[in-house]
Image (tube, rainbow, N blue to C red):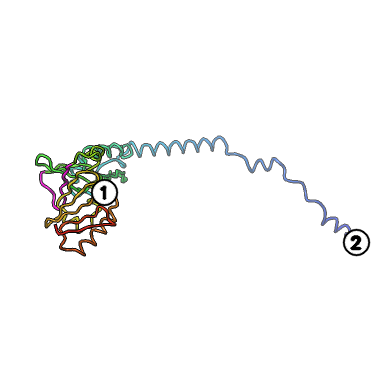
Amino acid sequence: MAGPSTAERGARRTSPPGPPPRRSAVRRRLRLPGRRTLLLIAVAVILLGAGAVWLLYGSSWLRAERVRVTGTTVLTAEEVRDAADVSLNTPLVTVDTGAIEHRLRERLPRIAKVGVSRSWPHTISLAVTERRPEAIVEEGGKFHEVDAAGVRFSTVSKRPKGVPLLEMEPDRSPSSRHFGPARLRRAAARVVTQLPEKVRRDTRSLRVRSYDSITLELTGGRTVAWGSAERGEAKAKTLTALMKARPDGGHFDVTAPSSPAVSRS
């Protein structure tokens, strides 16, 4: 029997593709989970959520059991713990870290910054940064420590070593009436932070008459007219150069760092 002709074979090769799959078959492939499956998923989610809530709030595994303190120098860890007043044996997740920070700042003014965090599973961590005294104000036989921002944060009975005395002697100029004691104190503390390290070690006191009139009294009877707290970096460089050039100098004037002056007394 003869096979298909060449024309028939060409017609078969060029015949159109068969009809697309039926829509019912597509629907079967895209069919959503059944009601029973959805119910099982919902139950599983609820159980997981309930377990997580119990773990955080009801179990004894994640409770605040200790308070860890780091960063203290003058303060003791026990002082910080007492001021923090953390409620122990409570769920760690319920500890109010913001309230702890507020209590520490309010009760311990020596603290400049504190980071309060939860260290799972049982610890509250307190990372403390204490204020550093840049100057001392003497009143009534007591010494008030002043930090770099001019904040009086602590009162001590004995003057700390290496901390200059701040003598506030405001004159009657309009400048002194405009700049109150707090601002003058802040300006003086800023000057201390600007001093070259060697000059800072030798500084016994700062006399503040106005915002533009701050004078340093150094060891050996030497004095430095610093002026205001402005242009501190330039004044520090100029003072260092003057002291190297004139080691016998008694009075240095860097109020205008571009036109300094030095004299023997």
In this rendering, would 100 be left or right of 41?
left
The residue singled out by tag 2 in the image is 2
Quarter holding the N terminus?
bottom right
The secondary structure that most of the magenta stretch takes on is loop
Q: Is residue 237 left or right of residue 37?
A: left
* Marks 2 and 1, how far apart at CA: 114 Å
In front of the other: label 2 or label 1? 1
| Residue at image mark 1 | 229
Q: Between 37 and 101, which is closer to the camera in this rendering? A: 101
Residue visible at 15% across and 42% down?
155
Magenta highlight range:
157-169
Instruction: Say whether residue 163 is magenta.
Output: yes
* Mark 1: amino acid: Ala
Q: Which mark is residue 82?
A: none
Question: Residue at position x 15%, y 58% from top?
Answer: 250
- Residue 166 at x, y percent in the picture: 17, 46
SS at badge 2: loop
Look at the image and tell me whether residue 161 can be seen.
Answer: yes
